[in-house]
Image (cartoon, helix red, strand yellow):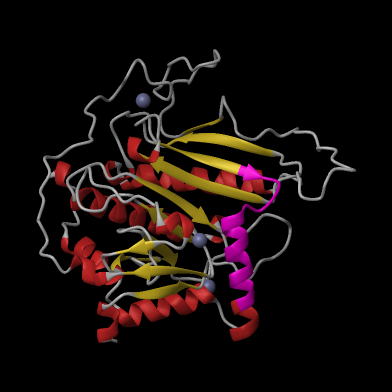
Amino acid sequence: MSEPALQFPHRRYNPLSKQWVLVSPHRTQRPWQGEVNAASGFSEVHYDPACYLCPGNERAGGAKTPVYEHVYVFDNDYAALLPDSPAPHTEGWPGLLKAERERGVCRVLCFHPDHSLTLARMAPADICRVVDAWTTQYGYLGRMHEINYVQIFENRGAMMGASNPHPHGQIWATEHIPDEPAAESAALADYHREHKSCLLCDYAEVETKAEVRIVCENDGFLAVVPWWAVWPFETLVISKAHLRSLSDFSEAQRSSLADILKQVTIRYDNLFSTSFPYTMGFHQSPTDGHAHDEWHFHAHFYPPLLRSATVRKFMVGFELLGMPQRDITAESAAERLRAVAATHFADK
Ligand SMILES: [Zn+2]
Ligand SMILES: [Zn+2]
Ligand SMILES: [Zn+2]
């Protein structure tokens, strides 16, 4: 599927969010500078006495992180959501000033006691433990009466605002389905009604045939730079089977997920020889009591880096006011991620 017009400015449609992205490939016709960075962003400190996520250390507010061996989950000491927020009474207020109660839970999941590790450098068995913990948390929080959506995510790197390099992620469980998954939920349901099939099952088939946007894959998962990618090296990890949520996974599928997360993050780190920053998170079935057969589990990686370990993309100007824009095409981003080694540069 080669189309010369795609070398000129055009826009691409994201059927999941029903939004467009402007692609301007002619701006990258200048030769690649081939910038090579000294390996950076890695800590060789396995235990940091000042890190509140390292085993045995005190956290702000007086709580103590116990000496843990594998994973450790706790309620965020400064949670953005509380389980018992009262309902605002705004009767008689102007309709334009709308507020709703939002009850919820925020948890922190430490992936590993070793301060220096990242998903890219953790042992596969240890990443499996993280996937198991995500599965348990999704099930547990999702069963709570007032919780209708469970958002699992990881913010990696200071550039993404991660305050602590210790390997960890967060789980925010909310009373309402947040806007991003709510938009996808509607799009998946619309597609299902219209085509009598699943949007992401169909999309995985399109990408498998096209090949050009595939970064890597295994038995259970396909990682692609999606057709509609906004961030330069954004990837979408799609389960090959139609799984609505982590609760539908077999043990083999859980370890496949662990494996694909390692593969993708290794390629990211190798791209600019750095500990690659990103926000990664899962989108999966809401936990509002409905079956949601239209839902298809997937992970989004949104990394900010553009040309090197320090040059990042900003969403400003036309992007804030109009629509997102990118220069490098999804196809060339995928090609570059495929071209780097499958083994982590720091583990050679
Ligand atoms: Zn630590
Ligand atoms: Zn599907
Ligand atoms: Zn999504």
User: Is residue 278 shown above or below 68?
Assistant: below
Horizontal and vertical percent for residue 309?
Answer: 21, 44
Give the residue at x 33% y 82%. 209
Using residue 144 as the reference point, say whether residue 78 is left or right of it: left
Which quadrant holds the C terminus? top left
Q: Which residue: 81% across, 50% down?
A: 95
Which quadrant would residue 123 be assigned to in this image? top left
Is residue 330 or residue 117 the one in the foreground? Answer: 330
Q: Is residue 189 magenta?
A: yes
Q: Position of residue 46 (x, y in %)?
A: 27, 25
Q: Return the x and y of residue 233 as percentages of the image width and height.
A: 30, 58
Q: Residue furthest right?
A: 92
Image quadrant in which the N terminus is located = bottom left
Q: Is residue 46 left or right of residue 91?
A: left
Residues 319 and 298: in front is: 319
Residue plotted at (50% across, 39% down): 170
Front-lying residue, 235 or 5 = 5
Q: How many marks?
A: 0
Residue 130 seen in render: yes
Residue 251 visible in the displayed image: no
Which residue appears at 13% of the width and 65% of the height?
30
Occupied quadrant, residue 41: top left
- Whether residue 308 appears in magenta in the rendering, the answer is no
In the image, residue 77 above or below residue 285 = above
Left or right: residue 1 compared with residue 171: left
Residue span colored magenta = 173-190
For residue 55, above or below residue 182: above
Q: Position of residue 75 (x, y in %)?
A: 58, 30
What predominant SS class does the magenta segment belong to? helix
